Every structure is written in C-alpha cells, then in structure tokens.
Amino acid sequence: MYKHSLVFSSACLGLLVFGIVMTVMGAILPSVLDKFEVSKASAGSLFVLMSFGIMIGSLVFGPIVDRFGYQYLLIAGAGLILLGLEGIAFSPYFHLLRLSAFFVGFGGGIINGGGNALVADISEEGRSAGLSLLGVFYGIGAISVPLILGSLLELRSYETILAVVGLAVGLPLLYFVIIRFPIPKQDRGFPIREGVGLLKKGPLLLFGFILFFQSGMEITVGGWSAAFFNEELAIGTGQSVLYLSFYWIGMIVARLILGIILKQISPALVLRISLAIAFTGSLLMLFSTGVGLALIGLLLIGAGFAASYPVILGYIGDQYPTLSGTAFSIALVIALAGGMILPYLAGIIGNVTNLRVSFTIVPVATISIAILLSIVLARISITPDSA
C-alpha cells in the first residue's frame, strides 16, 4: 500500500532536518556567547536542554510508531523543529533560547528515531547499508548550517539566516502530509509485556551504551569545534563556523562509501576500522598547533564516526524486528543521555581549563566503544570477520 522509494525519501528528508538540529547549536554558539554574554558552562546548558528534548522524543516515538505508524508523529516532529528554530532565531532572552532549544531537540528526537526505525523496517535485507545511506542525508543537513552561516554571517545576522532555515523545514513537513506510510506493526494493540521485556535484554542495553558514547562524542565535536578553532587556534568566528563543515564532509563521504562496502564486508569489522580512524583524528586535533593538522583531524573524526549509528541500529533491527521502534527508543534514550552529559562536561572542563583539554573526551569515549563492542559481539556470537 506504500511506495518504497517515497517512504525512503521521507526518512531521508527527516534525517536531513535532524542534521540541521544537531549542528545548529554548535554553529551559532560563538554568536550566542557574544550576544548574551554568558559563560561556557551556561552555553553548555543549551546542549543539555536540546539533548534532553531529543531524549524525550526518542522515548515516546518507538511505542507510538509500533502501535499507530509513522505519519502523524513525523509531522508533529517537523512542526516542533520549525517552531523551535524560529524561537532560537528571535529569542530576546537567554531563557527563551533554552526553551526553544528543548523544542528543537524534542522534534529532532521524534524525527531521528522515526526515520531510522522506518528505514530499518523497509530494508529487511541490508539494514546497515540502508541506514548508512540514510545517514548521508543527516550529514547533508548538518553541513548545510555551518556552510550557510559561515558564508553569510558577514552579510546577514545569524538570527535572519536561522529564521529562513527554520521556514525551509516546512517543505519536509508538507511531504510527510501527502505520502502514504507503512501500516502499524502492532495495529491490534501494543504488547506491553514484550515491550517492557526489552529493558531486560543485555545486548540491547550494551548497544545503547555504545551509542551513549557515540552520541556524546558527536554532539561534543559538532558543538564545540567552532569554538575550539576560535579560542585555541585564534580563528575568526565566521571562519571557525565554516571549518566545522570539515567534520560533516568526512561523515558524508564515509557514509556514501559505507552504503556500498557494508553490503560486502562485515559491519563489525567496518566499525572497528572506523573507530581506529576516529581515534587517530582525535589525537591529531588534540595535538595540533596549526589549522591544517586540526582540519585533517576533524575530517578523520567525522569519517570515523560515520559507521557507528548505521551498524549498531542495523544490529538492533536484526535482533528485535517485531518491536524495532520500541527497541530503537530504548537504545536512543541511553544514547542521548551521553549526548547530554559529555558536551556539558566539555563545557565545564573548558571553563576551568581550556577546550583542548575538553576534547580528550573523544579518544577516551572511542576506546570505551571498542571495549563495549567486543563484549556485545561476543554475547550475540558475532566476530569481526563474520557477516
């Protein structure tokens, strides 16, 4: 009753919007610091509120899509993001900016969870490859904000630019309204006992904690990199925001490649190699004394981060196919706890010392993921060389 290409396109549009959500705060952070004259710790609270909103959205979407389907929830998510982006653009007070950040996050959590679960449902063969291709659009959305802001900040205020970006979210919202989505998987009622039982599944919780560190790293790097270039390497605000695009370029290119190689090479092996790339990139950025080395490091970090979400969500979809939405909710809620804690911690450390010290979070979290990955693959009897 639905057309695969149209539904997949809707998920891609949703992840493109979520990419905007995930990068917007980091891209405007230097301007926010100047406008509201707040400390790094206070600015870090914006990431906490946005991530808390994403967590709530991630929590509610799963049982709802398993029971009622995807369409209305995706429409609601896009509407909240549009409202939140306009609020960020026009907030005259910092506390209103915080509220808008929460709305953007709440809608983003719905869009992200719904889009990923939707692709996992319609891509029974090659879930990781499908999710990796989906992630390309997340990267496109993410890179668009720093590119637009970096190019236009000298011509227009960040408030004006962000207001236009917010209005553009209305186009995916309209698309969600007009196309037909798959029917709910649990259309006769949600199996509460089975859903609650997922909380006892050890592999699912381990997958969630892998995404805990991954989400924390992604938001930390995306949120604080522009400020890192601005403060540690004495780069101007507009140029710093533009440099943030290297992170997303690395992720986009890597996910395009992953969409091909994940059909031929073990996802576990691909993820281990990706973690090594991210670790190397983080060290280059940490020890950089000039822009060139820092940009190479940032590019490698983006490329190294590309595999984690597609591979881990692919495993979750394979392990829990009948309640994939609820399983995704559980894993993503754990993930977004990391998205709240690690960037906030980076802000506190940066306030006490400097942002270079804050970025030690990245290699430490990468090592933690590698350890957890070995444990969970052993639990589900998957080796790095197995398909």
Image (cartoon, rainbow, N blue to C red):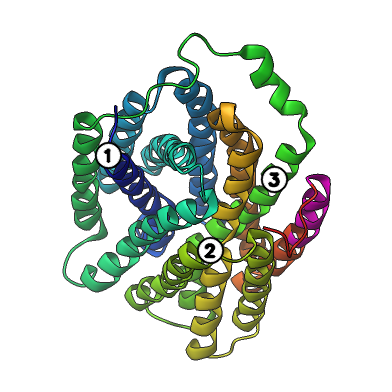
Q: Is residue 211 above or below residue 354?
A: above
Residue 260, can we see it?
yes
Q: Quadrant of residue 241?
A: bottom left
Residue 3 lies in the magenta-colored region: no
Amino acid type at circle 2 is: Ala
Amino acid type at circle 3 is: Phe
Q: Examine the residues drawn in magenta and state their main secondary structure.
A: helix
Residue at which label 3 appears: 207
Q: Earlier in the sequence, mark 3 or mark 2?
A: 3
369 lies left or right of 50: right
Query: Which is more toward the observer, 93 or 318?
Result: 318
Q: Which mark lies nearer to you, 1 or 2?
A: 2
Q: Position of residue 87 (x, y in %)?
A: 29, 40
As helix, strand or loop, the secondary structure at mark 2 comes to loop
**Disc number for residue 82:** 1
**Disc number for residue 306:** 2
Q: Which residue is farthest top?
A: 188
154 lies left or right of 111: left
Q: Position of residue 139 (x, y in %)?
A: 40, 61
Residue 373 lies in the magenta-colored region: yes
Whether pointer 1 and pointer 2 mark residues with C-beta atoms closer than 8 Å, the reply is no
218 lies left or right of 79: right
Cα distance in 3D space between marks 3 and 2: 16 Å
Q: Quadrant of residue 3?
A: top left
The residue range painted magenta reads: 370-380
Q: Residue at x 48, y 32 (%)?
A: 57
Residue 37, can we see it?
no
Q: Is residue 130 above or below residue 59?
A: below
Q: Position of residue 206 (x, y in %)?
A: 75, 44
250 lies left or right of 59: left
As helix, strand or loop, the secondary structure at mark 1 comes to helix
